[in-house]
Image: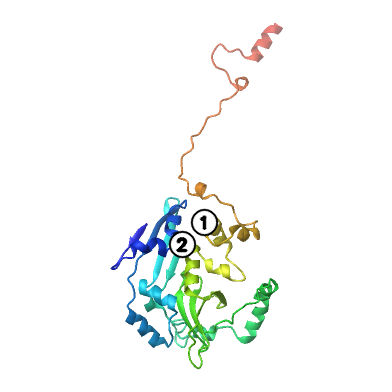
Amino acid sequence: MEERAGRGSIKPYLDKLTLGVTRILEASPGVTEVTFVEKEAAERHTIVSWEQKNGCVLPEDLKNFYLMMDGFHMTWSVKMDDNPMPLGSMTINSISKLNRLGAAPAYTLPNAPTLADLEDTDEEEGLWANVLISPLLEKGNTDQPEKPHLDSRSLIFELDPCGGNGKVCLVYKNTKPVVAPDSEIWFLDRALYWHFITKTFTAYYRLLITHLGLPQWQYAFTSYGISPQAKQWFNMYKPITVDTAQLSSEADTFVNKLDPSKVFKGKSKTPVLKKKLPASQKGPTGPGTKNPSLSGSSSRR
């Protein structure tokens, strides 16, 4: 595994910090270039400055994480036709990139709308709640927390950009009259719909590691699930916390059962074998061979 280290190395604690996932990846067929970018710990005054600037207190577990290392980034690739293709990515933004969502314009254009302007209205929210949440209620899952808002009702900070597939956010709700200290981890998909993940950062960090950073793994916590393409990777690399048999049972018609040991096996040229003709099909072999038509004519003479 390649490591890019800085001062105050955390290498002795790396295996515990990543729950041993680096060894799992390196032992997986086809996996290559497992890279961990080691980052220095954040200064305590930097954390205090962030809290004062944003008017809220970081959760204790996230604060302790930043005091150990200022962000997290691990990537891995798979070898396709002898060329590495980036696949897995696990990211926690550094505290300097723990930016608030909703206030900045969504596009770099004059008078561009903010994310709060693009958020669904209450009427549309009610419609989609019936479509998406009703199946969950029928299954007995009635504990649905109140969703965040991108306006002043919530404070939302981006923890993970998810490679452009959405955003994992640290959410503070009930900001009036003061910001409540409780926070939650939510996933904002590309259609700007919210999906609850966990109540604590520690629980989210475990999910991030045990899902191996596979593409779109956060969509496993949505009502519509991960894409067919992502299911292929889930079936090949089997995240530690996911029952992949259940993932593929709904769509056996388009999920291929791939064997990684065969997919990533090196190419070798197969020798071309020449077929031998049976003795009855062999043609004339020499000048002494008689032509059947000639022999028949001579017998009639």
Disc 2 residue type?
A: Gly
* Disc 1 + disc 2, Cβ < 8 Å: no
Disc 1 residue type?
A: Tyr
| Vertical position of residue 178 compared to residue 61: above or below | below
Please say whether residue 69 is visible from this viewpoint: no
Q: Residue at x 46, y 62 (%)?
A: 88
Q: Name which of mark 1 and mark 2 comes first in the sequence.
A: 2
Q: Which type of secondary structure does the marked residue at label 2 adopt?
A: strand
**Category of crowding for the residue at label 2, using alpha-carbon neighbours closer than 10 angstroms: few (below 14), some (14–19), many (at least 20):** many
**Category of crowding for the residue at label 1, using alpha-carbon neighbours closer than 10 angstroms: few (below 14), some (14–19), many (at least 20):** some
Residue 237, label in figure: 1
Q: Residue at x 44, y 75 (%)?
A: 61
Q: Position of residue 139 (x, y in %)?
A: 68, 71
> Where, quadrant-wise, is the C terminus in this rendering?
top right
Q: In the depicted view, which residue is nearer to us: 176 or 220?
A: 176
In this rendering, would 70 be left or right of 128?
A: left
Q: In the depicted view, which residue is nearer to us: 264 or 187?
A: 187
Q: Residue at x 57, y 64 (%)?
A: 227
Q: Position of residue 37 (x, y in %)?
A: 36, 65
Please say whether residue 157 is visible from this viewpoint: yes
> Residue at label 2?
88
| Vertical position of residue 47 compared to residue 135: above or below | below
In this rendering, would 7 be left or right of 229?
A: left
